[in-house]
Image: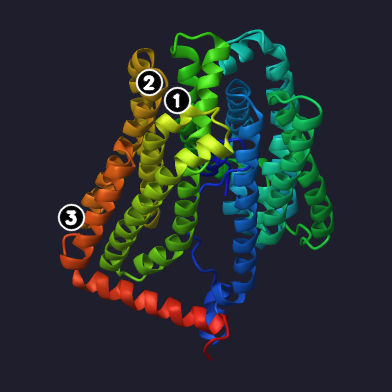
Amino acid sequence: MSPSFFDATLHSDTTADATAHVALPPLRETPTELQAVAAGKKPAAETLAAGVFFLLALTVVQKSVGLTRSIVFCRILTPEELGRWNLLFNFLVLMAPLAVLGLPGSFGRYAEHYRGRGQLRVFLRRIGISSILLTLLATAALCLAPERIAWLMFNDPAQVNMVWLAAAALAPMVLFNFLDELFTALRRVRVASIMNFFNSLTFACVGLVLLLTWSADATSLAYACIAGTSVASAGALVCLRLAWKDFPQDTSILTHRTMWSRLLPFAGWMWVTNVLGNLFDIADRYMLIHFSGLKASAAAAWVGQYDSSRIVPVLLISVAAMVGGVITPHLSCDWEAGRRGDVSRTLNLILKLAGAALLAGGVVILCTAPWVFTVVLAGKYNDGLAILPWTITYCAWFSLMLLAQTYLWCVEKAKWGSVALFLGLLANLGLNVWLVPQFGLVGAVWATAAANAVALCLVLWLNAREGMQIDRGVIIVCLTPLLLGLGAAYGLVGLIVLACCVWNTTWILNDTEKHSVLQTLAAGREKTLVMLGAKK
């Protein structure tokens, strides 16, 4: 995995979960794994069940901490300070993988490759040394032009102190990402999960203490971010030192030419993907800063209002990303076995169910939003409440795009997903330049919603171009998030109509799909009863 737009999107609210992950093409079974299956041993998926459960449980706890933290920070901070923190953090999310040219992102692909050839230690040393040097260069660049960076980040050259904080936070964040990528690649998923948990928890605790006892502004959160990544990285370094002893000694020579000629093309592709994805996620906020025509403080307040509208909707993306990670190996297995039609049918069903779930989730969020914004957030983010419907709309479209592009991973055409993102980014920038000066904050959200719709349509078209049979129900369901942008009432009516169509017609789900869903629900009910001890 590597830092990218997926979790950058998830974490671009008031969180400081500094890493982000992009789904890599599913790994093929190794000869050892195939031999184990042939010998009648349990497949890897079964032997790793406990680890997967641990990861899922920790992820739920971490997301709960993140959501609570985001709400509390929004309650304490003014919209201006919340916006300033959001701009700083998004800049760091963009810079962390950018600074090291995506090199740590190669761990997931090449760690086992070089381990098997007795060259793991030298591979890790070279990536580590290169990452250190590149991080020092990036930090120096920030320090040499602080006023220009302040203008880029905040449209305010006077915010030099925030640039110094960004420079101080960059190295800990790069180190955290580096270690997270490494432990994930080495299949020490528990260590990586605990790293992320302690980063999130430390950031929340330190941030809350500083906000309440020192200064209720973005500076406190910047220091908390540094503390979170540093504490988590320190613990991970101890684990790495212990794990290093178990790494096999190098048994063959790895020349620089051989290593870099193989590594750099892959790392470069990952680097481009990360940059495109992160820019796709954060472009609208920086367009608000530079094209709204407002003073820097007022524009930062708009960014804060925007950020408040994303606190809950980004959870929809989080769930979609988790589902995408789960279904990709299964779809890939069907593809490798030659069951191409099954891949299309399965993904069609998943998109339709996900679309219906996103519509239902959006309706719930919209119905509860007035209370959340008025009572929990103390009425400070009324502009965020006003744009919430369209924020949910584009989060739903982005979630569907994440799921749809798993088909491109299966057919090993992931580069086309980057093309879709690039064209979506161009649409986002162009529409923001046009709409922000005229409509302000709501114009930025409209532009982002339209850009996500463009990206989703492109991914579906590319899927069809590569052989996916997209049925009528997918198209209908992908249009339903538009109703959320019109308000809770329209979304609720759309949800009722959709449920009636599913129940009484085959416009959305055909008979085979309905039977499959009912079977899955029945099996899930049986497993739940067994787990609860109600049934043996």
Marks 2,1: beta carbons within 8 A: yes
On the image, numbered disc 1 is attached to which residue?
284
Circle 1 — which element? helix
Q: Residue 8: which disc?
A: none
**How far across and how far down the image is residue 525, in percent?**
44, 78
Q: Is residue 468 visible?
A: no
* Relative vertical location of residue 137 with respect to residue 454 in this rendering, above or below: above
Residue found 77% across the figure and 45% down from its top: 233
* Relative vertical location of residue 420 with respect to residue 240 in this rendering, above or below: above
Residue flagged by tag 1: what amino acid is it?
Asp
Residues under labels 1 and 3: Cα distance? 32 Å
Query: Which of the two labelled residues, at mark 2 and mark 1, occupies the earlier sequence position?
Result: 1
Q: Is residue 47 visible?
A: yes
Residue flagged by tag 3: what amino acid is it?
Arg
The colouring scheme, among rainbow, by chain, secondary structure or one colour, is rainbow
Residue found 61% across the figure and 76% down from its top: 47
Residues under labels 3 and 2: Cα distance? 32 Å
* Relative vertical location of residue 459 with respect to residue 346 in this rendering, above or below: above
427, 288: nearer the viewer? 288
On the image, numbered disc 2 is attached to which residue?
432
Residue found 68% across the figure and 25% down from its top: 218
Q: Splitting the image into 4 quarters, where does residue 367 fall?
A: top left
Residue found 80% across the figure and 43% down from its top: 231
Q: Residue 472: which disc?
A: 3
Circle 2 — which element? helix
Residue flagged by tag 2: what amino acid is it?
Asn
Residues under labels 2 and 1: Cα distance? 7 Å
**How far across and how far down the image is residue 98, in percent?**
59, 31
314, 167: nearer the viewer? 314
Marks 3,2: beta carbons within 8 A: no
257, 344: nearer the viewer? 344
Query: Which of the two labelled residues, at mark 3 and mark 2, occupies the earlier sequence position?
Result: 2
